[in-house]
Amino acid sequence: MDQPGPRLRRIRYLALALTALSLMIVTVSAYIRLNGAGLGCAPWPECYGQILAGAAHPHSGGVRILHRIVASLALVLGFVLVWQCQRPVPIAGPKRPAAALLALMILLTFVGLFSADPQRVWAGFINMLGGAGLVLLSWACFLAASGAAPKVGQGRGGAALLHAGLGFLALTFALGALVGARYAAPACPTLPGCGDAWLPTAAGLGALYPFVTISAPALLGDAGGAALHLLHRWCALAALLLLGLGGLRALARAEARRGAVALLVLLLVQFALGVLTVLSGFGLGLAVAHSVCATALLAAGLHLLLKLKAGRG
């Protein structure tokens, strides 16, 4: 009969490999999406969003092939991971995140059939959220197989702040995904507000609905694009404060100190990338790094939260 120790070791290796592959998928997808949108093109912003009018996609076929190879390999490993978690006897900890990970992979494969049309906001939006979900579920499976399971009666020392902060971070990520899916980057090229506006208008809140098709980018003066930027920035500020306070409180817990330091460093890096992305006129490299760092920040927050609840090193 298969022993649980070697199985857990295999599950950890598989989950770690899937985390790395998922991060690669997020990075390559961000490059393909943002390069296709026209970030970094000249003359800016007239060249932005030309793909919506039928212009050719600027990225090379090699990048697309790399994305498909990595995604296919991840899907195969996802099936292997679920099998390892279920047979011959289910392992309670990692089996749920592994099953959710495989289900998300299958969903994203289906959504990918509609992603060739950049005018479908919902397809791009779901793909961006799904990429972050792949990383989170892969890492959650690794943590579960490593024994980082919450214990009843624990969870203080900043966990409540982290819960709230991760909620705002998830909202920030979703709003940023809508900015990208709606091609709304140049709708707010100033900091900290959008010109003289600091709050979104009622007319711009309709941009929160993703199940639409668009034919042109949201340029400077677009109420919907400005609303998405402002909501994104206010949620980011709330996430920065809550996660920062939660991370500082967690420094007092020896078993969570490394995770707290990682979270605080990523918070500072992400804040700097966000500011520099806007100040640079939405440079392609900075925007890709901002997207990838946001995913890593979500994973770091989840890691620290589970460490605090488990009370383990």
Image: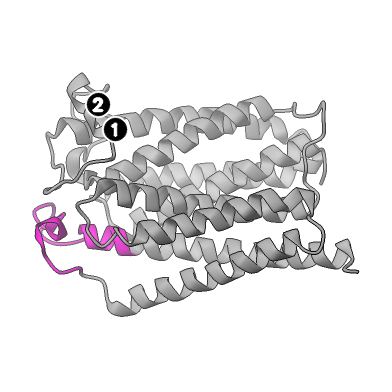
Residue 45: where, in percent of width, then height? 13, 52
Compared with 8, 180 (above or below) is above
Taking the image as shown, residue 2 lies to the left or right of residue 170, namely right
Q: Which residue is mark 1?
A: 208
- Give whichever of 127, 90 is nearer the camera: 90
Viewer-closest of 146 and 276: 146
Q: Is residue 34 above or below residue 192?
A: below
Q: Position of residue 191 (x, y in %)?
A: 28, 34
Dot 2, how many residues are within 10 Å of its Cα: few (below 14), some (14-19), or many (20+)?
Answer: some
Magenta part of the chain: 32-57
Give the quadrant of residue 182. top left
Q: Secondary structure at mark 1?
A: helix
Give the residue pinned by disc 2: 205
Q: Quadrant of residue 225?
A: top left
Residue type of the residue flagged with mark 2: Leu
Q: Please give the name of the residue rendered at 48% of the width and 72% of the height, measured from the top-left corner.
A: 72
Q: Position of residue 222 (x, y in %)?
A: 14, 34
Q: In the image, is 22 to the left or to the right of 57?
A: right
Q: Is residue 161 magenta?
A: no
Q: Is residue 192 visible?
A: no
Q: Is residue 243 left or right of residue 116?
A: right
Q: Secondary structure at mark 2?
A: helix
Considering the whole magenta stretch, tell me its main secondary structure: loop
Q: State the quadrant of the N terminus.
A: bottom right
Q: Residue extending furthest front? A: 88
Label ID, residue 197: none
Task: Please name whichever residue, 168 or 207, is drawn nearer the observer in this view of the structure.
Answer: 207
Whether residues under marks 2 and 1 lie with C-beta atoms below 8 angstroms apart, the answer is yes
Inter-mark Cα distance, 2 to 1:
6 Å
| Residue in the picture at 29% in, 78% down | 61
> In this rendering, does residue 237 appear at all?
yes
